[in-house]
Image: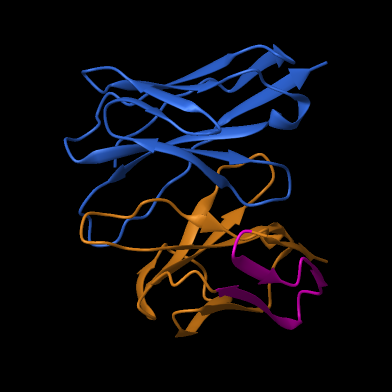
């Protein structure tokens, strides 16, 4: 399983765009990149998943460069409720049973 | 509500007690998982079930005993726990496809305190 590295914490203010970058230098050809959000005392919530280039949904965008050794989660115009831990995971497509291992994630704190 | 329901939400138990955690999903998923999240530590994968069969036990002590009677229900039986087992226990489910899984759905967890 490819190891991921992301900042331990980030701070932002309401209304700003937040970009969280994750490094995954050992990503394999059939690995997907997935991001989760976790609030205190709750389970992680799936945000977005991508393989290459750019993926966008109603919550966030995921930018993946051509070499796929990193990815950036972009949260547009954050609010106080976006304060949470964000996890970047790399999961293998076609595995016997996909199972995700979570690192420490990035604690995002949004200030008024 | 995520579609994965865990009960109870909070549990306090003594070291000699026996209790069970319950997880239920009605998403039609065929894989279920138990994770443990201790304070200031990453989520730790404990057990994996695929089509009711246990496919992974991540070196979990025998005082934790999982049970998966069907694809929709998952239990974690607890006995003679230690205070260091106090943590948030999370259940998750996913739909395994030929080309890998496409995201987990987690429950809200059970906050366990061992006294």
- Residue B106: quarter of image: bottom right
**Furthest-left residue in view?**
A29
The answer to whether one can see residue B36 in this image is: yes
- Residue B109: quarter of image: bottom right
Quadrant in the picture for the N terminus of chain B = bottom right
The answer to whether one can see residue A34 in this image is: no
Q: Residue at x 40, y 49 (%)?
A: A100
Q: Colour of chain A?
A: blue
How far from the left and from the top, in percent, is residue A81?
Answer: 75, 32
How far from the left and from the top, in percent, is residue A32?
Answer: 30, 39
Q: Which residues are magenta?
A: B2-25
Q: Residue at x 68, y 58 (%)?
A: B108
How far from the left and from the top, in percent, is residue B33?
Answer: 47, 65
Q: Is residue A40 above or below residue B10?
A: above
Instruction: State left or right for residue B37 relative to residue A27.
Output: right
**Furthest-front residue in view?**
A58
- Pick the residue in front: A112 or A103: A112
- Residue A68: quarter of image: top left
- Pick the residue in front: A43 or B115: A43
How far from the left and from the top, in percent, is residue A16?
Answer: 66, 11
- Tell me, yes or no, whether the highlighted magenta stretch contains residue B21: yes
Q: Residue at x 65, y 69 (%)?
A: B5
Quadrant in the picture for the C terminus of chain B = bottom right
Looking at the picture, the colour scheme in use is by chain
Q: Residue at x 65, y 24 (%)?
A: A108
Q: Is residue A30 above or below residue A54?
A: below
Q: How many marks?
A: 0
- Tell me, yes or no, whether the highlighted magenta stretch contains residue B14: yes
The letter of the orange chain is: B
Instruction: State left or right for residue B1 relative to residue B13.
Output: left
Instruction: State left or right for residue A92 relative to residue B69.
Output: left
Q: Is residue A90 above or below residue B29?
A: above
């Amino acid at each position: 399983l490819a190891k991921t590295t992301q900042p331990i914490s980030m701070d932002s203010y309401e209304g700003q765009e937040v970009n969280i970058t994750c490094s995954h230098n050992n990503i394999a050809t059939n690995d997907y990149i997935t991001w989760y959000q976790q609030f205190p005392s709750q389970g992680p919530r799936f945000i977005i998943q991508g393989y290459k280039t750019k993926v966008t949904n109603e919550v966030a965008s995921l930018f993946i460069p051509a070499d796929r050794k990193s990815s950036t989660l972009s949260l547009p115009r954050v609010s106080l409720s976006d304060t949470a831990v964000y996890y970047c995971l790399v999961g293998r497509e076609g595995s016997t049973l996909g199972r995700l291992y979570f690192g420490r994630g990035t604690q995002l704190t949004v200030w008024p | 509500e995520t579609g994965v329901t865990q009960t109870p939400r909070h549990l306090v138990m003594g070291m000699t007690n026996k209790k069970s955690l319950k997880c239920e999903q009605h998403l039609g998923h065929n894989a279920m998982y138990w994770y443990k999240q201790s304070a200031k530590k990453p989520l730790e994968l404990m057990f994996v079930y695929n089509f009711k069969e246990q496919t992974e036990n991540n070196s979990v002590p025998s005082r934790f005993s999982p049970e998966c009677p069907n694809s929709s229900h998952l239990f974690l039986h607890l006995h003679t726990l230690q205070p260091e087992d106090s943590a948030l226990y999370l259940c998750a489910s996913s739909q395994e496809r030929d080309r890998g899984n496409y995201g987990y759905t987690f429950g809200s967890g059970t906050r366990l305190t061992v006294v």
